[in-house]
Image: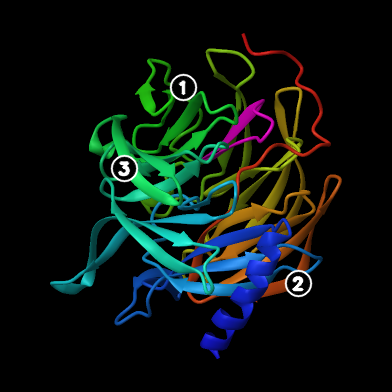
Amino acid sequence: MKAALLAGAAVALTIATQASAQIAVSGNDNKRALVNGVNTLMQNPRPDTVSIIDLNGRTPRLVAEVAVPHSVVGPPSSVAITPDERLALASSAERIDPENPNRTIPDNRLTVVDLRATPPRVVQTLEVGNGPSGISVNRAGTLALVANRMAGTVSVLRIRDGQVSVAGTVEIGPANAGVSHAQFTPDGRHALVSRDGDSFISVLRIEGETVTKLNADMSAGLRPYGMHVSPTGAWAIVGNVGRASAGNTGDVETVSLIDLRREPFRVVDTVAVGTTPEGVMASPDGRHAVVVLHNGTGRPTGHPLRGAAQVKLLRIENNRIRVVSEAPAGDWVQGMAFSRDGSTLLIGNMADKTIGVYRIQGDRLRDTGQRIRVDGGPAALRTAEVAASATTPPRQTQRR
Protein backbone atom coordinates (compact mmCIF):
# COMPACT_ATOMS: atom_id res chain seq x y z
CA MET A 1 0.00 0.00 0.00
CA LYS A 2 2.79 2.43 0.97
CA ALA A 3 4.78 1.47 -2.14
CA ALA A 4 1.78 2.33 -4.31
CA LEU A 5 1.46 5.70 -2.57
CA LEU A 6 5.12 6.48 -3.12
CA ALA A 7 5.32 5.33 -6.74
CA GLY A 8 1.99 6.52 -8.08
CA ALA A 9 1.72 9.75 -6.14
CA ALA A 10 5.30 10.73 -6.87
CA VAL A 11 4.43 10.75 -10.57
CA ALA A 12 1.57 13.12 -9.77
CA LEU A 13 3.98 15.28 -7.78
CA THR A 14 6.41 15.42 -10.72
CA ILE A 15 3.61 16.56 -13.02
CA ALA A 16 2.44 19.14 -10.48
CA THR A 17 6.01 20.43 -10.09
CA GLN A 18 6.25 21.06 -13.82
CA ALA A 19 2.97 22.99 -13.66
CA SER A 20 3.90 25.47 -10.92
CA ALA A 21 3.28 23.26 -7.91
CA GLN A 22 2.46 24.31 -4.42
CA ILE A 23 3.74 21.76 -1.96
CA ALA A 24 4.06 21.56 1.79
CA VAL A 25 6.46 19.34 3.70
CA SER A 26 5.68 17.84 7.11
CA GLY A 27 8.46 16.50 9.33
CA ASN A 28 7.10 13.59 11.41
CA ASP A 29 8.50 12.18 14.66
CA ASN A 30 7.74 8.53 15.43
CA LYS A 31 9.91 8.39 18.58
CA ARG A 32 7.57 10.36 20.84
CA ALA A 33 3.86 10.18 21.57
CA LEU A 34 1.39 11.35 24.21
CA VAL A 35 0.39 8.49 26.50
CA ASN A 36 -2.39 9.69 28.81
CA GLY A 37 -1.12 13.21 28.31
CA VAL A 38 2.53 12.33 29.04
CA ASN A 39 5.29 12.90 26.49
CA THR A 40 6.59 9.32 26.17
CA LEU A 41 9.57 7.85 24.36
CA MET A 42 8.33 4.91 22.30
CA GLN A 43 10.00 1.50 22.29
CA ASN A 44 11.15 0.15 18.89
CA PRO A 45 9.55 3.06 17.00
CA ARG A 46 8.98 3.16 13.27
CA PRO A 47 11.41 5.42 11.37
CA ASP A 48 10.68 9.14 11.38
CA THR A 49 9.41 10.48 8.05
CA VAL A 50 8.88 13.49 5.85
CA SER A 51 5.47 13.79 4.15
CA ILE A 52 4.94 15.74 0.93
CA ILE A 53 1.52 17.36 0.48
CA ASP A 54 0.19 18.78 -2.79
CA LEU A 55 -1.60 22.11 -2.25
CA ASN A 56 -2.76 22.48 -5.85
CA GLY A 57 -6.52 22.39 -6.14
CA ARG A 58 -9.19 22.78 -3.51
CA THR A 59 -8.35 19.70 -1.44
CA PRO A 60 -4.77 19.21 -0.18
CA ARG A 61 -3.56 15.63 -0.51
CA LEU A 62 -0.66 13.47 0.58
CA VAL A 63 1.49 12.42 -2.39
CA ALA A 64 4.66 10.87 -0.93
CA GLU A 65 6.51 9.96 2.27
CA VAL A 66 10.22 9.38 2.82
CA ALA A 67 12.04 7.92 5.85
CA VAL A 68 14.03 10.84 7.32
CA PRO A 69 15.38 11.39 10.88
CA HIS A 70 13.31 14.10 12.56
CA SER A 71 12.34 15.36 16.02
CA VAL A 72 9.55 17.22 17.79
CA VAL A 73 12.20 18.90 19.99
CA GLY A 74 12.41 22.60 19.09
CA PRO A 75 9.88 24.92 17.44
CA PRO A 76 7.71 23.50 14.62
CA SER A 77 9.92 25.03 11.90
CA SER A 78 12.49 22.23 11.61
CA VAL A 79 11.82 21.63 7.91
CA ALA A 80 12.28 24.00 4.96
CA ILE A 81 11.87 23.96 1.18
CA THR A 82 14.01 25.77 -1.40
CA PRO A 83 12.11 28.45 -3.39
CA ASP A 84 12.19 26.31 -6.56
CA GLU A 85 10.67 23.40 -4.59
CA ARG A 86 13.58 21.19 -5.63
CA LEU A 87 14.94 20.31 -2.19
CA ALA A 88 13.56 19.84 1.32
CA LEU A 89 15.77 20.16 4.41
CA ALA A 90 14.86 18.44 7.67
CA SER A 91 16.72 18.60 11.00
CA SER A 92 16.89 16.08 13.83
CA ALA A 93 17.46 17.52 17.30
CA GLU A 94 17.52 14.20 19.18
CA ARG A 95 17.91 10.49 18.55
CA ILE A 96 17.52 7.35 20.62
CA ASP A 97 20.69 6.46 22.46
CA PRO A 98 22.05 3.30 20.77
CA GLU A 99 23.43 2.15 24.14
CA ASN A 100 20.20 2.77 26.06
CA PRO A 101 16.90 2.71 24.11
CA ASN A 102 15.07 4.23 27.08
CA ARG A 103 16.63 7.64 26.60
CA THR A 104 17.58 10.10 23.87
CA ILE A 105 20.81 11.96 23.16
CA PRO A 106 21.42 15.10 21.06
CA ASP A 107 21.50 14.54 17.31
CA ASN A 108 23.36 16.70 14.79
CA ARG A 109 21.97 15.51 11.46
CA LEU A 110 20.35 17.52 8.69
CA THR A 111 18.83 15.55 5.82
CA VAL A 112 18.35 16.77 2.24
CA VAL A 113 15.48 15.29 0.20
CA ASP A 114 15.23 15.57 -3.59
CA LEU A 115 11.57 16.45 -4.17
CA ARG A 116 11.85 16.07 -7.96
CA ALA A 117 13.04 12.47 -7.90
CA THR A 118 10.46 9.77 -8.61
CA PRO A 119 9.82 8.86 -5.88
CA PRO A 120 11.36 11.63 -3.73
CA ARG A 121 14.51 10.39 -1.99
CA VAL A 122 17.22 11.31 0.50
CA VAL A 123 20.29 12.61 -1.35
CA GLN A 124 22.47 13.98 1.48
CA THR A 125 22.97 13.79 5.23
CA LEU A 126 25.03 16.61 6.79
CA GLU A 127 26.41 17.09 10.27
CA VAL A 128 25.75 20.52 11.84
CA GLY A 129 25.66 21.58 15.52
CA ASN A 130 24.06 19.71 18.40
CA GLY A 131 20.27 19.83 18.48
CA PRO A 132 19.53 21.32 15.02
CA SER A 133 16.04 22.79 15.10
CA GLY A 134 14.52 25.71 13.15
CA ILE A 135 15.61 26.08 9.50
CA SER A 136 15.09 28.76 6.87
CA VAL A 137 16.21 29.23 3.26
CA ASN A 138 16.78 32.65 1.70
CA ARG A 139 14.58 33.78 -1.17
CA ALA A 140 17.46 33.40 -3.65
CA GLY A 141 17.73 29.72 -2.70
CA THR A 142 21.48 30.01 -2.13
CA LEU A 143 21.78 29.90 1.68
CA ALA A 144 20.08 28.19 4.58
CA LEU A 145 20.37 28.80 8.32
CA VAL A 146 19.94 26.11 10.98
CA ALA A 147 19.50 26.95 14.68
CA ASN A 148 21.53 24.51 16.79
CA ARG A 149 19.43 24.42 19.94
CA MET A 150 21.92 22.61 22.17
CA ALA A 151 25.05 24.37 20.91
CA GLY A 152 24.24 28.10 21.03
CA THR A 153 25.10 28.44 17.33
CA VAL A 154 23.62 28.85 13.86
CA SER A 155 24.98 26.79 10.97
CA VAL A 156 25.26 28.49 7.58
CA LEU A 157 24.58 26.18 4.63
CA ARG A 158 25.50 26.80 0.99
CA ILE A 159 22.99 25.61 -1.64
CA ARG A 160 24.37 25.21 -5.14
CA ASP A 161 23.47 22.98 -8.12
CA GLY A 162 21.15 20.82 -6.05
CA GLN A 163 23.80 20.20 -3.37
CA VAL A 164 23.98 21.50 0.20
CA SER A 165 27.21 22.02 2.16
CA VAL A 166 28.21 23.60 5.46
CA ALA A 167 29.70 27.06 4.82
CA GLY A 168 30.27 28.17 8.41
CA THR A 169 29.02 28.52 11.97
CA VAL A 170 27.94 31.66 13.82
CA GLU A 171 28.27 31.88 17.60
CA ILE A 172 25.04 33.26 19.05
CA GLY A 173 25.35 32.65 22.80
CA PRO A 174 26.20 29.97 25.36
CA ALA A 175 24.98 26.42 24.77
CA ASN A 176 22.06 27.02 27.14
CA ALA A 177 20.88 30.10 25.21
CA GLY A 178 18.30 27.84 23.57
CA VAL A 179 18.91 28.98 20.00
CA SER A 180 15.61 27.84 18.51
CA HIS A 181 14.90 29.29 15.07
CA ALA A 182 16.77 31.38 12.49
CA GLN A 183 14.70 33.24 9.88
CA PHE A 184 15.88 35.34 6.92
CA THR A 185 14.32 38.69 6.09
CA PRO A 186 12.93 38.64 2.53
CA ASP A 187 15.72 40.86 1.16
CA GLY A 188 18.29 38.38 2.45
CA ARG A 189 20.33 41.06 4.25
CA HIS A 190 19.44 40.03 7.79
CA ALA A 191 18.12 37.15 9.85
CA LEU A 192 16.46 36.94 13.26
CA VAL A 193 17.32 34.25 15.79
CA SER A 194 15.04 33.31 18.70
CA ARG A 195 16.66 32.26 22.00
CA ASP A 196 14.27 30.72 24.51
CA GLY A 197 17.01 29.89 27.01
CA ASP A 198 17.86 33.50 27.83
CA SER A 199 14.85 35.29 26.28
CA PHE A 200 16.67 37.28 23.60
CA ILE A 201 16.10 37.71 19.87
CA SER A 202 19.38 38.20 18.02
CA VAL A 203 19.97 39.90 14.65
CA LEU A 204 22.39 38.63 12.01
CA ARG A 205 23.88 40.58 9.10
CA ILE A 206 24.33 38.66 5.84
CA GLU A 207 26.76 39.68 3.10
CA GLY A 208 27.13 36.97 0.49
CA GLU A 209 28.03 33.87 2.48
CA THR A 210 29.41 35.91 5.39
CA VAL A 211 27.03 35.90 8.36
CA THR A 212 27.81 37.93 11.49
CA LYS A 213 25.93 38.56 14.71
CA LEU A 214 25.13 42.23 15.38
CA ASN A 215 25.10 43.88 18.79
CA ALA A 216 21.36 44.42 18.46
CA ASP A 217 19.61 41.85 20.65
CA MET A 218 15.92 42.49 21.34
CA SER A 219 13.65 41.45 24.21
CA ALA A 220 10.06 40.38 23.61
CA GLY A 221 8.27 38.14 26.11
CA LEU A 222 9.50 35.28 28.27
CA ARG A 223 11.23 32.56 26.21
CA PRO A 224 10.80 33.60 22.53
CA TYR A 225 10.63 30.35 20.58
CA GLY A 226 8.70 29.98 17.32
CA MET A 227 9.15 32.91 14.94
CA HIS A 228 8.31 33.94 11.38
CA VAL A 229 9.07 36.93 9.17
CA SER A 230 6.24 38.32 7.05
CA PRO A 231 6.79 37.79 3.30
CA THR A 232 6.35 41.56 2.92
CA GLY A 233 9.43 42.18 5.04
CA ALA A 234 7.54 44.71 7.17
CA TRP A 235 7.38 42.71 10.40
CA ALA A 236 8.10 39.48 12.22
CA ILE A 237 6.09 37.67 14.85
CA VAL A 238 7.41 35.57 17.73
CA GLY A 239 5.69 33.23 20.17
CA ASN A 240 6.81 33.56 23.80
CA VAL A 241 6.21 30.18 25.46
CA GLY A 242 6.91 31.29 29.04
CA ARG A 243 7.54 28.66 31.71
CA ALA A 244 5.86 25.88 29.76
CA SER A 245 8.60 23.41 30.66
CA ALA A 246 8.59 24.34 34.36
CA GLY A 247 5.81 21.98 35.35
CA ASN A 248 2.24 22.79 36.34
CA THR A 249 1.99 26.30 34.98
CA GLY A 250 -1.17 27.28 33.15
CA ASP A 251 -0.13 30.89 32.61
CA VAL A 252 -1.49 32.83 29.65
CA GLU A 253 1.45 33.65 27.37
CA THR A 254 2.05 36.11 24.55
CA VAL A 255 3.09 36.78 20.98
CA SER A 256 5.16 39.83 20.04
CA LEU A 257 5.45 41.92 16.88
CA ILE A 258 8.82 43.15 15.58
CA ASP A 259 8.98 46.16 13.25
CA LEU A 260 11.45 45.46 10.42
CA ARG A 261 10.78 48.57 8.34
CA ARG A 262 13.66 50.54 9.80
CA GLU A 263 16.89 49.74 11.59
CA PRO A 264 17.53 49.00 14.34
CA PHE A 265 14.67 46.51 14.44
CA ARG A 266 12.46 46.74 17.53
CA VAL A 267 9.59 45.03 19.33
CA VAL A 268 6.49 47.22 18.98
CA ASP A 269 3.57 45.21 20.39
CA THR A 270 2.83 42.18 22.56
CA VAL A 271 -0.56 40.57 23.13
CA ALA A 272 -1.79 37.74 25.38
CA VAL A 273 -3.03 34.74 23.38
CA GLY A 274 -3.18 31.66 25.63
CA THR A 275 -1.09 28.86 27.09
CA THR A 276 2.06 27.70 25.25
CA PRO A 277 2.03 29.55 21.89
CA GLU A 278 4.64 27.22 20.40
CA GLY A 279 4.20 27.93 16.68
CA VAL A 280 3.54 31.16 14.79
CA MET A 281 3.42 32.00 11.08
CA ALA A 282 2.72 35.08 8.93
CA SER A 283 0.20 34.93 6.10
CA PRO A 284 1.42 35.37 2.50
CA ASP A 285 -0.13 38.85 2.16
CA GLY A 286 1.25 40.19 5.46
CA ARG A 287 -2.17 41.03 6.90
CA HIS A 288 -2.50 38.13 9.31
CA ALA A 289 -0.55 35.66 11.41
CA VAL A 290 -1.52 32.37 13.00
CA VAL A 291 -0.56 31.02 16.44
CA VAL A 292 -1.17 27.50 17.79
CA LEU A 293 -1.77 26.95 21.52
CA HIS A 294 -1.13 23.69 23.39
CA ASN A 295 -3.36 24.86 26.25
CA GLY A 296 -2.38 22.03 28.57
CA THR A 297 -3.03 19.18 26.13
CA GLY A 298 0.30 17.65 27.15
CA ARG A 299 -1.24 16.80 30.55
CA PRO A 300 -3.29 13.78 31.63
CA THR A 301 -7.06 13.73 31.22
CA GLY A 302 -8.67 15.32 34.26
CA HIS A 303 -5.68 17.53 35.11
CA PRO A 304 -6.97 20.93 36.32
CA LEU A 305 -4.79 22.78 33.81
CA ARG A 306 -5.69 20.66 30.80
CA GLY A 307 -7.70 22.55 28.16
CA ALA A 308 -8.47 22.32 24.46
CA ALA A 309 -5.79 23.11 21.88
CA GLN A 310 -6.52 26.05 19.61
CA VAL A 311 -5.51 27.85 16.44
CA LYS A 312 -5.91 31.62 16.55
CA LEU A 313 -5.94 34.05 13.63
CA LEU A 314 -4.26 37.38 14.37
CA ARG A 315 -4.72 40.64 12.47
CA ILE A 316 -1.57 42.77 12.02
CA GLU A 317 -2.31 46.43 11.38
CA ASN A 318 -0.59 49.72 12.22
CA ASN A 319 2.09 47.91 14.26
CA ARG A 320 -0.51 46.26 16.45
CA ILE A 321 -1.73 42.67 16.92
CA ARG A 322 -5.28 41.60 17.70
CA VAL A 323 -7.00 38.21 17.81
CA VAL A 324 -9.83 38.09 15.25
CA SER A 325 -10.83 34.41 15.04
CA GLU A 326 -10.12 31.00 16.52
CA ALA A 327 -10.78 27.31 15.88
CA PRO A 328 -10.09 24.01 17.65
CA ALA A 329 -6.94 21.98 17.04
CA GLY A 330 -5.68 18.52 18.03
CA ASP A 331 -3.70 17.69 21.18
CA TRP A 332 -0.02 18.71 21.17
CA VAL A 333 -0.62 20.96 18.14
CA GLN A 334 2.57 21.89 16.27
CA GLY A 335 3.36 23.37 12.85
CA MET A 336 1.41 25.28 10.22
CA ALA A 337 1.65 26.14 6.55
CA PHE A 338 -0.32 28.50 4.30
CA SER A 339 -1.21 27.93 0.67
CA ARG A 340 0.29 30.57 -1.61
CA ASP A 341 -2.98 32.53 -1.84
CA GLY A 342 -3.45 32.44 1.93
CA SER A 343 -6.89 30.82 1.79
CA THR A 344 -5.84 27.35 2.99
CA LEU A 345 -4.03 26.62 6.23
CA LEU A 346 -2.52 23.29 7.31
CA ILE A 347 -2.12 22.54 11.04
CA GLY A 348 -0.14 19.59 12.42
CA ASN A 349 -1.70 17.55 15.24
CA MET A 350 1.20 15.66 16.82
CA ALA A 351 -0.85 13.43 19.12
CA ASP A 352 -3.18 11.88 16.54
CA LYS A 353 -0.71 11.99 13.60
CA THR A 354 -2.93 14.06 11.34
CA ILE A 355 -2.77 17.40 9.55
CA GLY A 356 -5.91 19.50 9.75
CA VAL A 357 -7.13 21.61 6.83
CA TYR A 358 -8.54 25.07 7.59
CA ARG A 359 -9.92 27.90 5.45
CA ILE A 360 -9.39 31.63 5.90
CA GLN A 361 -11.75 34.20 4.45
CA GLY A 362 -11.15 37.78 5.50
CA ASP A 363 -10.79 37.75 9.28
CA ARG A 364 -12.52 34.37 9.69
CA LEU A 365 -10.79 31.06 10.36
CA ARG A 366 -12.75 27.83 9.79
CA ASP A 367 -11.89 24.17 10.38
CA THR A 368 -13.02 22.19 7.29
CA GLY A 369 -12.95 18.90 9.17
CA GLN A 370 -10.58 17.36 6.60
CA ARG A 371 -7.65 15.47 8.12
CA ILE A 372 -4.59 14.15 6.28
CA ARG A 373 -3.07 11.15 8.05
CA VAL A 374 0.73 10.96 8.01
CA ASP A 375 3.28 8.38 9.13
CA GLY A 376 4.38 9.88 12.45
CA GLY A 377 3.52 12.87 14.59
CA PRO A 378 3.68 16.00 12.40
CA ALA A 379 6.25 18.05 14.32
CA ALA A 380 6.93 20.73 11.67
CA LEU A 381 5.24 22.09 8.55
CA ARG A 382 6.56 24.47 5.88
CA THR A 383 6.07 25.67 2.34
CA ALA A 384 8.65 27.44 0.18
CA GLU A 385 9.43 31.06 1.11
CA VAL A 386 8.44 33.06 -1.96
CA ALA A 387 7.62 36.68 -2.82
CA ALA A 388 4.66 38.26 -1.03
CA SER A 389 1.20 37.95 -2.56
CA ALA A 390 0.26 40.45 -5.25
CA THR A 391 -2.47 41.68 -2.90
CA THR A 392 0.08 42.83 -0.34
CA PRO A 393 -0.47 46.47 0.68
CA PRO A 394 2.46 48.87 0.22
CA ARG A 395 4.78 49.47 3.13
CA GLN A 396 3.98 52.46 5.28
CA THR A 397 7.58 53.62 5.40
CA GLN A 398 10.84 52.74 3.73
CA ARG A 399 13.83 51.15 5.45
CA ARG A 400 16.49 53.67 6.33
Q: Which is more N-terminal, label 1 or label 3?
A: 3
Front residue of this view, candidates 244 and 336:
336
Q: Is residue 277 visible?
A: no
Circle 1 sits in a helix, a strand or a loop, which is it?
A: loop
Identify the amino acid type marked 3: Val
- What's the residue at 54%, 48% (across, down)? 82
Circle 2 sits in a helix, a strand or a loop, which is it?
A: strand
- Residue 396, quarter of the rendered image: top right
- Residue 32, quarter of the rendered image: bottom left
Q: Nearer the viewer, mark 3 or mark 1?
A: 3
- Residue 150, quarter of the rendered image: top left
Q: Position of residue 111 (x, y in %)?
A: 38, 58
Relative horizontal placement of residue 281, taking residue 368 as reference (left or right): left
Residue 113 vertical position relative to residue 234 in the rendered view, above or below:
below
Q: Which mark is residue 369?
A: 2
- What's the residue at 71%, 43% (across, down)? 283
Identify residue for label 3.
Answer: 166
- What's the residue at 48%, 29% (across, down)? 191
Circle 3 sits in a helix, a strand or a loop, which is it?
A: strand
Magenta part, dominant SS: strand
Identify residue for label 1.
Answer: 218
The span from disc 1 to disc 2 (Cα, nearest Å) is 39 Å
Front residue of this view, candidates 373 and 209:
209
Residue 384 highlighted magenta (yes or no): no
Q: Looking at this rendering, what residue extends furthest in the top direction?
A: 400
Label 3: how many Cα within 10 Å (few below 14, some 14–19, many 20+): some
Name the image quarter holding the N terminus.
Answer: bottom right
Q: Looking at this rendering, what residue extends furthest in the right direction?
A: 362
Name the image quarter holding the C terminus.
Answer: top right
The span from disc 3 to disc 2 (Cα, nearest Å) is 42 Å
What stretch of residues is rendered in magenta? 227-241
